Amino acid sequence: MRNRSETLRRDSRKGVPSYLYFVLPAIILVGIILLFPIIYSMVISFFNWPQVDSGNRFFMWGKNYLDLINDHEFWHSLFLQLGFIFIAIPIELVIGFLVALLFNREFPISGVLRTLLLLPVFTLPVLSGLTWRLMLQPGYGAITYLLSLVGFDFPQGILSDKSLAYSAVIVQDIWRMWPFMFVILYAGLVGLPKDIMEAAELDGAGFFRKTFTITIPMLRPTITTAILLRIIDALRIFSEVFVMTNGGPGGNGTMLYSLYIHKQAFEFGKLGYASSMAVILIVVSVLFAFSLVRKNMDIDTM
Amino acid sequence: MKKLLAVLFIALLVVTALGATKIRVLAWDDAHTQAWVQNLKAFEKATGIKVDLELIPSGSMLQKTALNITENKANYDLVAIDEGNVAKFGNLLIPYSQWPEGKVFKKISTSEIPQAIFAAALWNGKIQGIPINGNVYVWMTRKDLIENPQYKKEFMEKFGYELKVPETLDQLANMAEFFASKGIYGFAPFTKNTEGSTCEAIMFFEAFGTHFMEQVNGKYVITLDKEKAIEAILFYKRLMQYAPPGANDMGHSERIAAFSDGKVFSMFQWPGIIPTHENEDESLVAGKIIYTAPPAGPARRAAVRGCWILGIPKASKNVEAAAEFAYWLNSHDAGKKLAEDGMTPVRTDLLTDPELLAKSPWYQGMAESGLFAVSRPNRVTYYPEISEKIKVNWLAAVTGAVDPETAVDNMISQVQELLDKYEK
């Protein structure tokens, strides 16, 4: 350890520490690909920045942010977005966890089934949105037809109604993304030490006791990671909802946050205003990440 | 000697190439403009003008044009501009009245194209370019249904007049009601959360005799008559009673499917989509459609317009050659060949040409609709925001989420807020 420090010090005397040469390309790449767009968005969020009229771009302090406070549609889209997250992700988590428990033992064709279960995750979001839109059509949609067989008839169409369309968007996301939860939790389950489970069984612990007092607490970091990844992904949900409902029905029935950013940026051409919304999205993501990691990953002791 | 001739020939080619005028043209990419590509050589041969034609997806046109056309810079000599963006670029274009006369192709007279279509290029009281496609609502009616003797007889007995192409919205409502009793949907609305819903609102407001916005003393003011707007909404709701399931969320794909499946009696369609209905591989009603102007409301017929125009930037250095190319595209002979290759014409004589009509019967409807073309209130740079307010409130009203009176009040107050913000 002492030798390594000495080497670094020696290199430092010559100028730049040698390890910096190795990490510099990565730092530059991250800077260009990740940091520059974020900083650029932050900067133009303080400007009036029309998409077309370049002569009309000027600094306007925090007016975009003040305007957001008074923008009813902004709050509505944020509300829908958070609702989407708090409804969809817990359901995905529960389904993913239960299926992971089911697959945490070997049985015939379990390997094949595990692979097949992952298929929805690999479906392109656009394709998923379009397929669900077709399946939910009145008259010829497969899901509409199946629902009508069990007494749920929607003659005006599921996507015509604000609440139903919002629910449909959530169900579509659950269908597509629960296997993602499953695969992460399954990997966590497989990695749990077997001896603790065996000891618990010898002590007479049943399935539920083991699950709630051993499995879940030990899986906490894995669960946190899965939730965090899903929240970050869900905050950016766009294409599947865009093709499924385009933010409708009724104008804003499913106008989730990203769709509203897109509308402001590319329909209204207000890039500065849209950037201020994007900055808030980053802040919300960071808040989620920070609170989850801090509470569940013992970051202070790391 | 041979070597000398070869050198001279090459030198001649080089001189010709260097001497030829070359123009850069920017347009959207689809079947219409691919027809231009197929026929470019004919233009180059006739004029000696080389054309560098750049075709890009229509969704990228706004940004590309904005980046390449300014007051002092023009990387293109001729640009296609969607009617909705005329307000953004109108000031940067040479007014059509100042376009030079053509040397090979005649300058297009405003009488050769319906006036209401030419108005697509209107900006600040001046025509700033030339329309290049006659994109306007065309009304489609099922010929096989209105010619069915049994239906004709029953309709006459019930309503006391002949079953035919609806000439008024009231007739349309009667026919929709009649066919609903026969298991055929009378009308397919457009209620998707897109610009199409704004078009529906504007069409019905105009048909009921009220114009949404007008310029007064250089500023825009809302001129929507509340009573007439409510009447228009109530009538649309009446029609929606006879619409297919899912009427509250119908966009292009749903309407195409319903009509091509033979389930709908009558509806509007954009010309660019009509070939789908006439394609026997995709449609059960191919060859069974009559194309006309939309039925008249209490005030008038109104067909919403959404044309592309060609404009010459003020900063272009090849104005004459650019104008020549635009005249060629809109000339009768070249236009006919282009139409045969997939371009939708805009000239009245081509839209009514028997040979073209035999192949594309909807041209007749385009010619008729062109006479009644109306514009959306898109002569302001912030039109997308205005459209959003119209659309959201119109949809809320016609789908029953709010009552028509509240919707119209909201529409007016919300658009007024935008006017107050932008028209200072």
Image: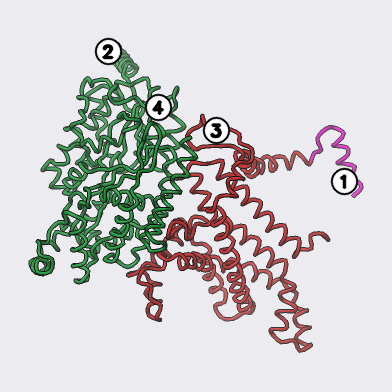
Chain colours: A red, B green
Local SS, label 1:
helix
Tag nearer the camera, 1 or 2: 1
Distance between the alpha carbons at the discs numbered 2 and 4: 48 Å
- The percent position of residue A219, horizontal first and vertical second, equals 71, 71
Tag nearer the camera, 1 or 4: 4
Quickly name the residue at label 3: A57
At a point 59% along the width and 76% down the height, the residue shown is A99
Residue occupying the far right of the picture: A2
Mark 3 Cα-neighbour bin, 10 Å: few <14, some 14–19, many ≥20: some
**Chain for disc number 1:** A
Q: Quadrant of residue B331?
A: top left
Mark 2 Cα-neighbour bin, 10 Å: few <14, some 14–19, many ≥20: few
Which secondary structure is most common in the magenta stretch?
helix
Disc number at residue B92? 4
Residue A243: in sight, yes or no?
no
Q: Is residue A4 left or right of residue A124?
A: right
Camera-side residue of A302 and B150:
B150
At a point 16% along the width and 46% down the height, the residue shown is B364
Q: What amino acid type should be assigned to the residue bearing mark 2?
A: Leu
Q: What residue span does the magenta drawing correspond to?
A: A1-18
Local SS, label 3:
loop
Camera-side residue of B17 and B381:
B381
Quickly name the residue at label 1: A4
Mark 4 Cα-neighbour bin, 10 Å: few <14, some 14–19, many ≥20: many
Distance between the alpha carbons at the discs numbered 1 and 2: 78 Å
Q: Quadrant of residue B181?
A: bottom left
Q: Quadrant of residue A185?
A: bottom right
Q: What amino acid type should be assigned to the residue bearing mark 3?
A: Arg
Asked if marks 3 and 2 fall on the same chain, the answer is no
Asked if marks 1 and 4 fall on the same chain, the answer is no
